[in-house]
Amino acid sequence: MRVLGIESSCDETGAAVVDEGGRVLSDVVESQIDTHAPYGGVIPELASRDHLRNLGPVVHEALARAGVTLADLDGIAVTNRPGLVGALLVGVQAAKGLAWATGLPLVGVDHLVGHLLAVFLRRAETSPEPPRFPFVALLASGGHTAIYRVDGPRAADVRELGATRDDAAGEAFDKVAKLLGLGYPGGPVIDRLARQGNASAVPLTLPMAHARSFEMSFSGIKTQVAALVRERPPSGEQELRDVAASFQAAVTSVLAKKLVAAARAEGVTTVVLGGGVAANSELRERTTRLAAEHGIRAVLPELASCTDNAAMIAYAGVARLRAGERDGWDLVATSTTSLPRTTRKGRGAR
Ligand code: KG4
Ligand code: ZN
């Protein structure tokens, strides 16, 4: 089975061809970072227009690189939620057009399920052995941060164990980078700077870090960094590195700790990372180390599978198609995820 995946939920236009074994035959991502960088964040209207311009060429490129034509495919998968509705619509309409013209089955994919399954993608012979179900996964991206128990490859198999009550972890990286004048997106820059910083230089603490629950909070640390910058702006490269290292250590230690604790509470012996923040080198190291200390296997997606891509959407589409599922022409773009949320937003003891 070979499936074309299409992704346009935020600021990457993606198309990919993936087979049922998760082998990535092609994966084309056209990033809009340069379009949005001057604004310090994603401008929805500009995102839609860019998707519209880029999607056709990106799909052509994905088919060409995979060495296939539409006639060689078994289905078309498209992200239809969650995301910017105007951006999602571009992908959904293109996928419907292709499905209508070819007669291929169409399946909508929840972007978050795509991130949770990214670890199954195989980009090379050296790709890590994929995990077995059930596993406990941390999904940490620019829009979402939650820990899930994953019993199978479809949305109905995913149960939230705890999520952030406010900002997403990637959002905290982006906002802190902006406060420090490091540009957008912040994650990769902070990751790089932190490597040469002293993580105990600046006392930063995360709310709910020691709570026994798997809920998290990332907005407080951004406020701490804002206060710090206001009182005494970091002067010189080394002080910037120290703030970056202190911030990153605080965030990644909580993420790794809660993930491993959740797996132990569930009696599950595999943990998985997903989402853009899963590309963070310190999070990857901490997760691997802490999991090993508890006899748990940590499976990490390859770097190209962490940030937004269409290969993970195609693979989630494979799972739906294999289960005999397909969507009709009434498939709509929706801003929210289909995964039930158990964590409420906001403060207070729970
Ligand atoms: O999954 P993704 O590409 O898009 C969403 O679905 O949100 O995640 C993007 C987020 C951004 O907030 C970006 O700063 C963060 O992932 N990110 C990182 C790293 N690379 C990307 N955060 C920390 N360290 C990184 N190396
Ligand atoms: Zn994403």
Image: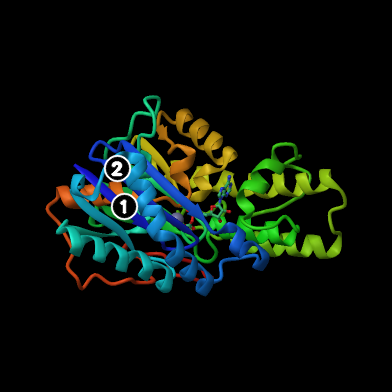
Which quadrant holds the N terminus?
top left
* Residue 114 falls left or right of residue 2: right
- Which residue appears at 39% of the width and 39% of the height? 271
Can residue 350 be seen at all in this image of the molecule? yes
Task: Determine the image quadrant of residue 85.
Answer: bottom left
- Which residue appears at 56% of the width and 66% of the height? 42
Q: Nearer the viewer, residue 195 or 127?
A: 127
List x then y, in percent, for residue 214.
45, 54
- The verdict on label 1 being within 8 Å of ligand 2 is no
Local secondary structure at mark 2? strand
Type of amino acid at the residue the image marks with label 2 = Val
Whether 304 is drawn above or below 187: the answer is above
Which quadrant holds the C terminus?
bottom left
* Residue 321 falls left or right of residue 88: left
Mark on residue 18?
2
Query: Dot 2, how many residues are within 10 Å of its Cα: few (below 14), some (14-19), or many (20+)?
Result: many
Q: Mark 2 or 1 closer to N-term?
A: 1
Residue underneath mark 1: 5
